[in-house]
Amino acid sequence: MPLNQPETPARPIEAHERQRPTLAPRVSRRALLAGGLGLVAADSLLLEPRWLEVNPQDLFVSALPSGLEGLRIAHVTDVHLAGLHAAARAVMDAVETERPEVVVLTGDLIERPEELATLSAFLTQVRGTIATAAVLGNWERWGKVPRPALRQVLERAGAALLVNDSLRVSVAGGSLELVGLDDPVAGEPDPAVALRRTRGGPLLWLVHAPAWIDSAPADLEGIAVLAGHTHGGQARLGPIAPFTPTGSGSYRSGWYSHGFAPMYVSRGVGTSVVPARLFCRPELPIFSLRRA
């Protein structure tokens, strides 16, 4: 090469020749699945069982007596008081804050006689400013909770135990009849007997297991039926609740209009069998009576 010939310029490195960056290691499907299941387990065991939803509802009633306008009814069900667990304490705080005029407890408050003392502590804050009423669930019967002892604990807290019985709630300018039935799964609900003491006024029916309404006499009347028992399925897949206890029928949670009166089925407060909830938070509905 001649000495005066210019040097050949360096050739630029083509893109395909550049060093490729080191890729992060790929996460396996098994690891992703394990992580997802871990999050679901943490939610169902640690978060949702204690994450109470206070759920205000308007209950519209035709020809509602003027004194009942705005009357609030807190519906507590399926607490399963093995102890004052987090959701139960949340209910205590919510009722103390909201101060509803009426509190109704629709069964499965406790499962064993040993839990009567816990129920007594729970009721120190869970009571209506005017009236409190309770009905039996299947667990009070299956657990052989002595009815006299249960009635005594309730009465000390100012609550009435209604087993095919009724309680008249009187306020200025009107009255409301709470009609409480025996548990349909383990007991013998008898609406005819429950109505004997009623003296007129809107009827609010209280029953533990909602499937009772499918066999209820068609000539019954009422402004609503309040029930529990289903736990809303306790573990849900979107809108689907694959597992519900006997006595649930086709009902899961929320409002239904298949019977003689509109029925609200609460998801309840506690858990049963498995101490977990999945996409199905514990619930405290509070109904305000409104004139239709």
Image (tube, grey):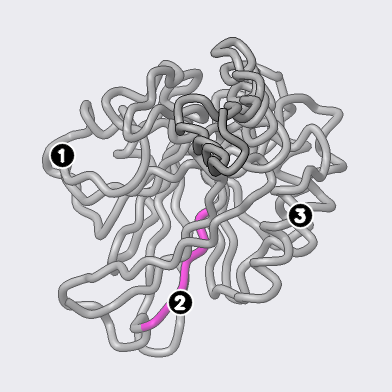
| CA neighbours of label 1 inside 10 A, class few (<14), some (14 to 19), many (20+) | few
Residue positioned 45% across, 26% down in the render: 16
Dot placed on the residue nearer the N-terminal end, 2 or 1: 2
Left or right of 253 in this view: 105:
right
**Amino acid type at mark 3:** Arg
Which residue, given by chain and number where applicable, does mark 2 sit on?
170
Dot placed on the residue nearer the N-terminal end, 2 or 3: 3
Residue 89, labelled with which disc? 3
Dot placed on the residue nearer the N-terminal end, 1 or 3: 3
Say which of marks 2 and 1 sits in front.
1
Along the line of sight, which residue is nearer the eye, 118 or 163? 118
**Amino acid type at mark 1:** His
**Which residues lie in the magenta part?**
70-75
**Amino acid type at mark 2:** Ser
Left or right of 211 in this view: 34:
right
Say which of marks 2 and 3 sits in front.
3
Which residue, given by chain and number where applicable, does mark 1 sit on?
258
Left or right of 105 in this view: 285:
left
